Amino acid sequence: MSELISLEIDGKICNANEGESLLNIARANGIFIPAICYLTRCSPTLACRLCLVEADGKQVYACNAKAKEGMQVKTTTENIAKERRAIMEVYDVNHPLQCGVCDQSGECELQNYTLYMKVDSQNYAIKDIPRPTQHWGVMNYDPGLCIVCEKCVTVCKDMIGSNALSTVKRSSDAIEKTFKDSMPKDAYSMWNKLNKSLIDFDENSCTDCGECISVCPVGALVSHDFQYKSNAWELTRIPASNPHSSDCSLIYYERKHESIEKHNVLKIYRVTNDHHYVSLNGAARFAYDFENKVQVKNEVAFNSAIEAFKKATSVKFNSFITNEEALLLQKLKEKLGFKLINEDAFKYQRFLKAFSSVTGNSLYKGSLKEVHNADFVISLGSFLKHDLPNARYAFNNTIVTNKANGLYFHPIVDKIVEKIGKKGKSSEFIYHKPLKEEAILYLILDLFANENLPLNIKEYLESLKEKRVKTVIETKKEQVIEKVIDEQTGEEKEVKKIISKDEEKQVEYIYSKLLDEIEQDESFYELISSMIDKKQSFSLIIGEDLITHPNWETLAKLCGLIEKYTNFNLVIIPTKTNTLGVSLICELDEKADGFIVGYNEKADFELSALGDADLDIPALNQQEGTFVNIDKRVVPTNAALPYKGYTLNDIANKLLEQEIEYTIKYTQALPLKKGFKAICFDDLSNYFSNDMQENRGYLLDVMEVSSSEEFTISSSEQFSKTQEEITIYKANPINVFNEFVAISHEFKEKAKTGIYLSKALLEKLCLNEKDSVNISANGKTLKLEVYLDDQIDGEIAYISTFDKNIKTKELFDSYRFNKAVISKA
């Protein structure tokens, strides 16, 4: 851990960690230093050079300079002011004067800094070269507006991990030599680079997160669907939480009226984020228009819903729901006695309970913030890019910016995830067969557990080890004497020489059968030993593959042992937006029977926010309430759009014979014994401060639970298939987490229900995109369309499950992997 030090910036005493950047320290202490290119959580690029400061009498860049004890810093001097003004003049050279129609106008950093530095004249000029606009996936790029600050390149590399953007050379006229002598050196260097560069795009690496749009300080990168739709100052920002995945990241719905004619109709125009503190996935940023446009209350349908609840023997729902709604369903269960069914939350609940039975704590210790800051990180059992992109960002960010090491275990080869770090040095990707997760957990215990590990586990691990003999080549150096002829005298003389001699040698070493399980050899131990050298903080990301595993209870307890007896802090990814919250609030049952009421689920009587059911209910962008995110934080979300129909609270009021006006009245009634706090919704904060502290809601209290380390040690099950079968996996295409994403304007053409194959598997099976095939598995046969996913490799196909009307989940048992026979339809 770095030491706390004290330094002085503009006469203000600041406390900081030794080695922290001067720019971050200044921001945390409310001291302004201009910077266009720097991103708080990423590595400095030194592209803009505006953050010049004087530290102990020497000019340095605040984004790159590290704090030292007693350092004296001045944020501006006469020379620095000249440099900064010259840099801003250079940025304004040939920059199009189209602020009136530019989408960034009103929140443009180029505008702000030009005014701040009082640039009212121009001393530099060069002939402009045509740079045509380009359309890239979800965005448009205008090189004419681009100032090549490299923020987009940096965030894609250091945070997102896609490496889809890069800086490349462009044609241009040379800068006149007279400028080199007449202008400040930093301004000249920056101009020389700007004049020769632009940004390039790799379509095959992009995951459509739009983070590059968010960080762009000018109007060079813009969402193609927002461009020319609104001025920034016309929009009202509504703070909320990502409704599509369990990061529940802070987002802002930005809305205004739909048109002059429809001035009373509100519409969301875009979603934005505080990119210095949090990144968004594509669904959070672009799948915002999924509201249920209900204008009147349907009393007949409401009365039918009341009767359906009275009649129900089971109520089925999913985890795209607020904590308050989950509490209402629990109260209705207690009153009416029906079964409460939520498939993913039930599996998560039982896994977490088994995990806690070993650790003695109700929750896991880790968080995504800790993953961001870790020295060593492992991901196991998650198709990370698809399951939770923000976990992938954390995994990538710590490896790239913290120089951490990482291991990624999964059966599916993900070519984008493989870009994390440098394979074989900072990160390693182990593609194992399905059902090997148990062996990997034992291997982690073998490698990292301390001496307090329970005796039966120690003995089991020892029983897996055996001595083997390996032939190695050993190089020995020997001294020999050779007789040579002296070229000058012609006489013979003796010369001493050192020669290398290779000899084969038989070496005994300890080998674990666990390495056989995941098809690794003894060099894997050597690799891990080199990776963990001098590492202090460890994070382990556990994914859905373990939660749904046939031997889930043993795996959960092994995870508990790892958290208890190693240095790893675990993060167990909640499978849907509010899976963790639901699992804490609701008493869930395993299987539905009888008459079923569905809440956003297929059933005999359906309540749905999709506008396709017996009774309409509001979508999550029309509700106030809270979620519990992956970091175990209760975070608020606000309604961006109105809803004029009935809500679950209306149904609860009728059935529970009460009058609670707003659903958020239940926020303070969430169960204290599960770690919630009696805090009113309106008292929950939802922002990040300049010192990078997350002021969002509150952290759940960790409760003590009874614990026991006794469980039966079992051997891994085997996953075998015939030559006629392929391996299938239950997963959704990137960003398409649910049906709400699928109906949004940005994704409705991209959200395809079907089977997704790598190019290699497509060729092996002699299939083409959009072929119709029959998939037979788990006693079911479904006809699906074929799609290519060129971001994966190998011979495992995944099948989408987001559409409740197409029963693709029936092709699987509980585990995410299965065997299937595929044939052309």
Image (cartoon, rainbow, N blue to C red):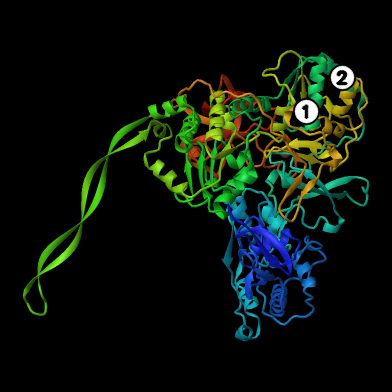
Which residue is at a point 60% across and 56% down the rendered structure image? 3
Which residue is at a point 73% across and 28% down the rendered structure image? 674
Indicate whether 749 appears above or below 71: above
Amino acid type, label 2: Ile
Is residue 37 visible in this depiction of the protein? no
Residue 671: which numbered mark, if any?
1
Amino acid type, label 1: Pro
Secondary structure found at label 2: helix
Secondary structure found at label 1: loop
- Count of numbered tags: 2
Residue 786 in the image, given as x and y percentages of width and height: 58, 36
* Residue 248 falls left or right of residue 235: left
Indicate whether 282 appears above or below 145: above
Which residue is at a point 35% across and 35% down the rendered structure image? 511
Structural crowding at the residue carrying mark 1, measured as other residues with C-alpha within 10 Å and reported as few (<14), some (14–19) or many (≥20): some
Residue in front for this viewpoint, 446 or 135: 446
Residue 5: which numbered mark, if any?
none
Residue on which disc 2 sits: 306
